[in-house]
Every structure is written in structure tokens, then in C-alpha cells.
Image: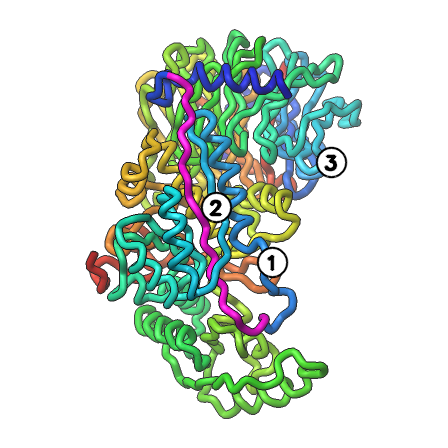
């Protein structure tokens, strides 16, 4: 071990000339934090989806390991403080982190909390939105201090729509939940249908009336209720469910009145990440994560990893540890980061959304990745997903 | 038919010296062996789990295979394809390079951010060198004094002294550097960047990037152009770059660094190997499960040969 450290130090010292502009191997700390805002709520309808205690944080730990490995060649040391809080206490925790000198905070929260934290932070700190999908956060309610690593509802809906149109499944039966986030996703799906030429032939709202979730023999009820709920819909190719709240969509596959595939919030789902991804070097990335955490990687872990890797990548490329320089670099058209999705991820300057492919996956496997080849764009094919420059309602 | 004729002519002009071509199949867990003269498959042989990097000793007596999921390098008799022994490799060996003398072997451990140096005679680990995240590409200077490792997430080419095992320089290149290859007089080092879409030409004496080769193919999305394997003819005049899902091999002028031509090969082309006479170049096409054979002089793809599941690496036995 000692021998290795000597080798390492020698390496760092000698490399300073060609890469880092520093004269001596002085190590600069780049502090960040991950703030996970938890709300009391029902457990997910599948016990396989119970959130692990280190949700998101595990991604942060891998990112810090990755950043530090590169950082030792650059004289940079990365840290991410992990904080669990509630919607009421979140602003106070954020103030504490800012007082400690943290310049970058990854937020795992719902749309409403994300927006209030962005307003609370002002220009004191840069935020990374890792979980809130709302299009308003990238549109009328956009904030200059926030980078959205999470894909927007519009990107998820467009990714799904491109695939469904490629399949020529253009007649959709849209079922939306009764929670605000469900309504928001349904709105994005309607927009996608118009954008790509699908027709929503039937729309229904599944009211969340509470009820017996996951009770003993609950499947008997589900088997009776879901066919009744979906019967006599207009002729459709596919069911598209908008259920961000996770109330009913999981019950739809194999229970619909008509034998049609289910997509959206169940069945074939558009998402940022999937633990079965193997392509584009993802195998070794998943391996590293699983070795560190002993569990598969979730979207929250991937997006938190991505946010912190962006900071690391900016620090390497700009050869700077100055927060203002890093912020400016990440928002510039010079910035690109590799995210194991087969192409570089870049920044939309009009709403600070990270461009990225959308994975379409079932429970165990990847089915496709959008953008589909046939959808072209004059700037980046990734801009066929989500709100393009000319459509944005965002002004910083 | 024309291709066949070209092939026949080309083979007629070749001294009749067949070499064995070894292709590692990442998902098939085997190696397909071809005959470089007839281009027929001789056979396929199990080689352990997730074989990727593959190379052969200068005397042609030992075939080395990175069995990534076995955390070992497996060594085979290239004639019989019987396993003779294994070498400790460190975890998840992906790609490696032999010292020009045939010893030692420098191995990139993708999951562990290390380069492991192994003595091929004593089978002992000589050193473990900490490098960047996801080490993959391994190159060695013609004089054997410098070993290059590229780290895919750190995005650097690390220059390693082959005797002291110390890192002497780090050069930041574009995203996901996959492969490092010197030209034969050691005056240029080529480092491909898969996500960056470029090949950096580095002057090894100053460790500075002197040129970045970019690629543009009509009708192919820029995102699909993902440079991986690089091979240089021994006179340095031609550089071949495998472009991954662009399904092309770029031909580059080794003097001017200009792209001369793109050759259409199979799907997702990653690694390449010349025959010893450099008349043919074999490419591994991971998505179409075949090998394309390029006639180096006429720059034509003369044949594709089906191999195993997801071909990854390729090496040709010396004369």
C-alpha cells in the first residue's frame, strides 16, 4: 500500500506540467451535497420497489469515487454530504449547507418542493434537479440556478411516442391518475400525440379513492375492477397510462378489457435508467455500482451520479476548482459528459435541461432507446425529445 | 463476383503462408479461429467467461485471452487451443498489451482502476498501477519503454514507465478513450475517443496533442460515429480506425492525418488486426456477429465471415 502511494504521488507530481496548470500538487476541495426530501406516503404497490435507505446517495458515492480517481491526477478532491430531510425542513437544511460552503446541491424532491427550494436558494448555490419531471420547471417556472438532470415529462412522453409511432400503434387509450403529477404527465402525453401524429381515441381518469392496496388476496379485486374500468373503450392499439403517483398503472397489464399492451407508467416505460442496461459500457458501470452497494441501480442513483459527474467533468475539462468557473462551463455549449447511454450528454441553454436518450424498458429488459433513428433534427437528434428552443416558455 | 475475383487475385499474390486468426466472442464465451488464406472457419473453442482482449506472443506459441468475468488471463496453445495455464490479471481484465519482447503483459482492470503487470514466464504479478476510472486501452511504444493506458471515465491517456511502473504524464483527451496505438517509429501516438468521436494524435516526446482527427460520413448520424480500435501500417502511411455503430472503418493518411476513405464493414466494428504481411485487415463486428476482411492495398472489403456471438477482439498469429 505504501509503495502504491509513493508511486501515485510521483505520478501526480510529474503529470502536473502537461495537464493541470498547477505548479505544485496542492489538493483543492470541491464540496457538494445531496438533499433528499422525503414525504410521508404509501409504500409502492410492488414490494420489489420499496426504496432502499441509500436511494440516490449510493449514486453519489460512486460519482465521488469516480471524480476522486480522476481528481488525484488533477489535484482535486470531491465531497458530497448526504442529507435526508422533509419538505418543511428542507429550506433550513439548504441554508446550513450553503453556510458550510457547499456550492452544488443535488435535490431529490417532487416538483413543488424542487421549485420552492430553487426560489429559496437564489444565486447562492447551483442546484441539480434529479427527480422532478414537471415541464413547468423547465418552462414558465424555470430558474437559472437549476440544472435538470432528470428528463422532463415531455422528454419521457416523446421518447415513448416515437417508439409507438415506429410500431404504428397510433391509436392511444389514455388513462390518467387523479394526482397533479399524473395530470402533468398526461398533458405531456397529449402534447406528444399531437407532435408525432398519434390519436388519443379514449381518455379516462382513474380516481385515487384510497382503498385496499396490497391487501391479502387483493388481486381478486384487481382482477374484477380493472376489466370493468377499461371496458367499452374506443378501438385502440395501446393503453398509455399516466400514473406518476404509482396508484394503479401497475395493475393494468393483463387486466385490461381488450387485449392491448400497456405503456407509460407500467408495461413499457420510458425512463432515465434501467438496471438491465448493458450496452455502451453500462455493464462495467452497473458492476461498479453493485459492488459498492449490493443492489441494482435505480433512476435516482443514476441521475444523482450524473449530476455529480457533471461537476467532476467540468472540473477536469476547465482545469479549475473555482465554483463560478465550473457553473459557467457546465452551462456552456463546450460542455459534454459521457453517461453510458451511447452518446455524449449536453446542456440545453434555453432551459438548463440535460439532453439525453430515453430508455424504453419492461421490468427485466431494455426494449428500445429513443430518439428513434427516423426522427431527425437540425441541431441534435436528442432535441426531438422534449421542449425545443423555439417552443420554450422559459426566460431566465 | 467482383469481390471474389479481387480476393482470388489478392490471395494469389500473397506468399502461401496461412496464419491463424483468433476472434474472441464476448457473449459466446469462445474464440473462433479462421485461416487467413482460405478465410474459412477452422473451429471455435471455449475460452472462459466474457472473453474480450486477445493477443499472441511474438513467437506465436502462446495465445492470451482476457476472460473478464473469470478475473483471469487464460493462456492457450494456439495450435491445439488447449488451455496451458492461467495468469493472475486482477479483476475484470478487459484489454492488454505485451511488451515487444513478449514479457511482461500489461493488463487494464476495468472495474478496479488498475493496470496490472504480469510476468508471462514466472506468472507473477510485478506491479499494480493505480490509473483513472475504467481503464481500457493499452499501448506500448516500439522501444518498449513507455506503456499507455486510457481510462474511459477519467478521459486521460496515462503514460507509464515500463520499468519503474510510474506514471510520467497524463494527457486529457476526448470522452471515453478506448484504444491507444503507436506508429512504428514511435513518433505518433493515436488515442481514440468513443463518445468524443475523435482520434487524438499525440506527440509522445512532448505528450501534447498535435492534431485531432474528426470524422464525417454522409448519411450517418454524428452520434453514431464512435472511434474504437486503431491500427497503423508498419511504414506509418495508413491508419485504420474502427468507427463502432457507424459500421465503417476510416482510412487515414499517416503523414497528414487526413481521412482518405470510409470502408463499409459489419455492424458495430470495434477491434482490428493485420496479417503479418499487412495485406489483410480483420475487423470484429459485434452486432452482426461477423468479421470483415479488408484488402489493405486496394482498400476494399473483400469478405465477411460469420463468427460467434458478439465478436470483440482479434489477433493474427505471426509467421
Reading the chain from its start, which is encountered first: label 1 or label 2?
Answer: 1
Residue at the (44%, 88%) spot, across then down: A234
Residue B26, image x and y in percent?
63, 39
Residue A26, image x, y percentages = 41, 22
Image point 27% across, 61% down: which residue? A142
Question: What is the magenta range?
Answer: A24-43
Q: Nearer the viewer, residue A228 or A76?
A: A76
Q: Secondary structure at mark 2?
A: strand
Secondary structure at badge 1 equals loop
- Judged from the image, the secondary structure of the residue bearing numbered disc 3 is loop
A236 displayed left or right of A354:
right
Q: Position of residue B201 (x, y in %)?
A: 37, 21
Q: How many marks?
A: 3
Residue to which mark 3 is pinned:
B48
Q: Which residue corresponds to mark 2?
A: A81
Camera-side mark, 3 or 1: 1
- Hey, which quadrant is residue A213 in on the image? bottom right
Relative height, residue A214 to residue A297 (above, below): below
For the question of whether residue B294 can be seen, the reply is no
Residue toward you, A98 or B5: A98
Both labels 3 and 2 in a single chain: no
At which x and y percent is residue B13? 53, 18
Whole-angstrom CA distance, mark 1 to mark 2, is 18 Å
Q: Which chain does the numbered disc 1 sit on?
A: A
User: Of the residues tagged 1 and 2, which is closer to the observer?
Assistant: 2
User: Which residue in the structure is indicated by mark 1?
Assistant: A52
Q: Is residue B174 above or below residue A165?
A: above
Residue at 46% over, 43% down: B245
Mark in the foreground, 3 or 2 = 2
* Disc 3/disc 2 C-alpha distance (Å): 42 Å
Amino acid at each position: 500500500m505504501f509503495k502504491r502511494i509513493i508511486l501515485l504521488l510521483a505520478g501526480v507530481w510529474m503529470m502536473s506540467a502537461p495537464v493541470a496548470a498547477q505548479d505544485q500538487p496542492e489538493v483543492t476541495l470541491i464540496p457538494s451535497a445531496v438533499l433528499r426530501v422525503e414525504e410521508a406516503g404509501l409504500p409502492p404497490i410492488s414490494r420489489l420497489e420499496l426504496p432502499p435507505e441509500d436511494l440516490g446517495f449510493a449514486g453519489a458515492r460512486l460519482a465521488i469515487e469516480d471524480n476522486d480517481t480522476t481528481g488525484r491526477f488533477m489535484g482535486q478532491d470531491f465531497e458530497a454530504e448526504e442529507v435526508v430531510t422533509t419538505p418543511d425542513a428542507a429550506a433550513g437544511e439548504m441554508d446550513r449547507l450553503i453556510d458550510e460552503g457547499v456550492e452544488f446541491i443535488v435535490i431529490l424532491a417532487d416538483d413543488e418542493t424542487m421549485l420552492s427550494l430553487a426560489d429559496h436558494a437564489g444565486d447562492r448555490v447551483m442546484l441539480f434537479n434529479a427527480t422532478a419531471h414537471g415541464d413547468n420547471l423547465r418552462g414558465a417556472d424555470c430558474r437559472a440556478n437549476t440544472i435538470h438532470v432528470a428528463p422532463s415529462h415531455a422528454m419521457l412522453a416523446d421518447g415513448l411516442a416515437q417508439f409507438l409511432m415506429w410500431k404504428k400503434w397510433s391509436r392511444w387509450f389514455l388513462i390518467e391518475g387523479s394526482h397533479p403529477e399524473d395530470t402533468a404527465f398526461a398533458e405531456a402525453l397529449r402534447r406528444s400525440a399531437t407532435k408525432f401524429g398519434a390519436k388519443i381515441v379514449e381518455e379516462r381518469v382513474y380516481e385515487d379513492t384510497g382503498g385496499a392496496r396490497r391487501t391479502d388476496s387483493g388481486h381478486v379485486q384487481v382482477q374484477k375492477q380493472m376489466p370493468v374500468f377499461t371496458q367499452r373503450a374506443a378501438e385502440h392499439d395501446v393503453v398509455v397510462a399516466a400514473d406518476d403517483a404509482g396508484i394503479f398503472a401497475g395493475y393494468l397489464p393483463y387486466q385490461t378489457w381488450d387485449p392491448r399492451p400497456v405503456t407509460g407508467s407500467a408495461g413499457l416505460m420510458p425512463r432515465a435508467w434501467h438496471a438491465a442496461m448493458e450496452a455502451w459500457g453500462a455493464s462495467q458501470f452497473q458492476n461498479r455500482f453493485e459492488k459498492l452497494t449490493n443492489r441494482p441501480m435505480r433512476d435516482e442513483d443514476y441521475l444523482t451520479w450524473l449530476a455529480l459527474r457533471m461537476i467532476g467533468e467540468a472540473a477536469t475539462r476547465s482545469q479549475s476548482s473555482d465554483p463560478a468557473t465550473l457553473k459557467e462551463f457546465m452551462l456552456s455549449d463546450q460542455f459534454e459528459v459521457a453517461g453510458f447511454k451511447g452518446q455524449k450528454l449536453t446542456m440545453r441553454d434555453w432551459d438548463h435541461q440535460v439532453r439525453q436518450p430515453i430508455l424504453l424498458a419492461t421490468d427485466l429488459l431494455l426494449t428500445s432507446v429513443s430518439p428513434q433513428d427516423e426522427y431527425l433534427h437540425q441541431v441534435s437528434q436528442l432535441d426531438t425529445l422534449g421542449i425545443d428552443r423555439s417552443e420554450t416558455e422559459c426566460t431566465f | 463476383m467482383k469481390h471474389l475475383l479481387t480476393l482470388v487475385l489478392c490471395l494469389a499474390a500473397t506468399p502461401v503462408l496461412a496464419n491463424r486468426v483468433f476472434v474472441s466472442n464476448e457473449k459466446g464465451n469462445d474464440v473462433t479461429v479462421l485461416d487467413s488464406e482460405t478465410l474459412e472457419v477452422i473451429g471455435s473453442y471455449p475460452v472462459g467467461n466474457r472473453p474480450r482482449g486477445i493477443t499472441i506472443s511474438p513467437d506465436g506459441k502462446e495465445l492470451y485471452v482476457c476472460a473478464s468475468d473469470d478475473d483471469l488471463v487464460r493462456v492457450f496453445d494456439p495450435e491445439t487451443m488447449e488451455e496451458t495455464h492461467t495468469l493472475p490479471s486482477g479483476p475484470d481484465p478487459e484489454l492488454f498489451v505485451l511488451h515487444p519482447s513478449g514479457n511482461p503483459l500489461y493488463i487494464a482492470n476495468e472495474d478496479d482502476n488498475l493496470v496490472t503487470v504480469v510476468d508471462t514466464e514466472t506468472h507473477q504479478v510485478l506491479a499494480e498501477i493505480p490509473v483513472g476510472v475504467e481503464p481500457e486501452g493499452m499501448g506500448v511504444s516500439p522501444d518498449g519503454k513507455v506503456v499507455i493506458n486510457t481510462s474511459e471515465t477519467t478521459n486521460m491517456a496515462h503514460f507509464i514507465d515500463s520499468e519503474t511502473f510510474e506514471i510520467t504524464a497524463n494527457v486529457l483527451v476526448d470522452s471515453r478513450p478506448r484504444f491507444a496505438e503507436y506508429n512504428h517509429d514511435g513518433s505518433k501516438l493515436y488515442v481514440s475517443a468513443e463518445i468524443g468521436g475523435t482520434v487524438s494524435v499525440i506527440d509522445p516526446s512532448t505528450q501534447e496533442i498535435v492534431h485531432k482527427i474528426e470524422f464525417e460520413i454522409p448519411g450517418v448520424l454524428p452520434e453514431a460515429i464512435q472511434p474504437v480500435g486503431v491500427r497503423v501500417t508498419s511504414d506509418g502511411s495508413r491508419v485504420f480506425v474502427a468507427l463502432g455503430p457507424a459500421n465503417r472503418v476510416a482510412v487515414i493518411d499517416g503523414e497528414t492525418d487526413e481521412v482518405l476513405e470510409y470502408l463499409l464493414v459489419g455492424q458495430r466494428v470495434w477491434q482490428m488486426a493485420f496479417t503479418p504481411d499487412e495485406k489483410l485487415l480483420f475487423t470484429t463486428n459485434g452486432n452482426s456477429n461477423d468479421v470483415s476482411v479488408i484488402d489493405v492495398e486496394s482498400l476494399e472489403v473483400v469478405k465477411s465471415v460469420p463468427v460467434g456471438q458478439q465478436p470483440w477482439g482479434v489477433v493474427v498469429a505471426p509467421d
